[in-house]
Image: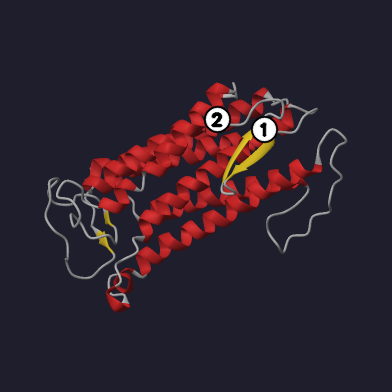
Amino acid sequence: MHSHTLTRFESGNHDEHGFWGPTTSSIDWCERNYIVSWYIAEFWNTISNSAFILVGLLGIFQAYRHRYETRFILIGLGIMIVGFGSSAFHGTLLYEYQMADELPMIWSIMVWNYAMFLMEKSIDKTKHTLTVVICVSYAVIYSVLHVYFAFTITFQVNFALMIAISGFILHKNCVEHTGRSFIPLVIVRKRRPSDHYNPIEIVNLYSLCWHYVVILLLALTCWLTDQFGCEILHNLPFGLPNPQLHAWWHVLCGYNCHLGLQLSIGLREKVINQTRLPQTIWYGEVWPVTNRKDEKVG
């Protein structure tokens, strides 16, 4: 294993010692270590990963129950594994568990990009094979390099690039299947929905696209503020506690993953079922569930 330096976001050392011993990971986040529990290095950053685990489990159950394609089970499984890996990393701050967090993130985003890229009703076998080979090869090569070199900035840039590619593919699908762009400055000529489709369901798909992007941007704001504003967050006026924005990043990303899964199900069902558009029901106005129109939702 290549040696690495530790990246910290707070000057000085205000951490406590705990069960897992010295930090061996290449990054130590803004939350101070072992403050809440002697057994958990970063308490809030650890328990907030329950959002990923819950969303992943619900996604797998939904895909299995309604007999959706395997791609949706893989997406749910990836989300859940990221949650367990991230919990292990933040709970211990050990290098091996850092890899258990970061490598599944790469593999999961590749599965997501695969699912969003191959949206045609009849997928060309050559295109499918080439897409799988490219996604798997990239994930394998990057994983090997990442384990050896313990990237920090490079990992973040790489993941941001994957998110950007994901956004591009999502925008393409959103325009193609709803006739609208979620980017305000992009004007798309509106398409008349097919006679088979209820326009309100087109609006619901677009709403999922828009919510997905907004929540992702809000999550990124929390992630960046936690890093670059760490000193300020630990010294808020009136004795206010650190709001633990990295934990909120986890919660918002978990919610974003749920939105993305429901969106991908909706888009895919629209493509393969030309005579019925999937319905999306928002429970409590905040929790969407997408399903085939002739089946119960929930």
Binning the other alpha carbons within 10 Å of mark 2 as few (below 14), some (14 to 19) or many (20 upward) gives: many
Q: Position of residue 33 (x, y in %)?
A: 20, 56
Q: Position of residue 206 (x, y in %)?
A: 70, 48
Give the quarter of the figure containing the C terminus. Answer: top right
Q: Is residue 75 above or below residue 162?
A: above
Q: Nearer the viewer, residue 162 or 60?
A: 60
Amino acid on which the number 2 mark rests in the picture = Phe
Q: Nearer the viewer, residue 191 or 6?
A: 191
Which residue has dot 1 on it?
A: 268
On the picture, is 253 further left or further right than 29? right
Number of numbered callouts drawn: 2
Q: Position of residue 218 (x, y in %)?
A: 51, 60
Which residue has dot 2 on it?
A: 72
On the picture, is 237 further left or further right than 11? right
At horizontal 42% and vertical 37% (from top left) the residue drawn is 54
Res. 147 in view: no
Q: Nearer the viewer, residue 215 or 96?
A: 215
Amino acid on which the number 1 mark rests in the picture = Arg
SS assignment at label 2 = helix
On the picture, is 205 further left or further right than 69? right
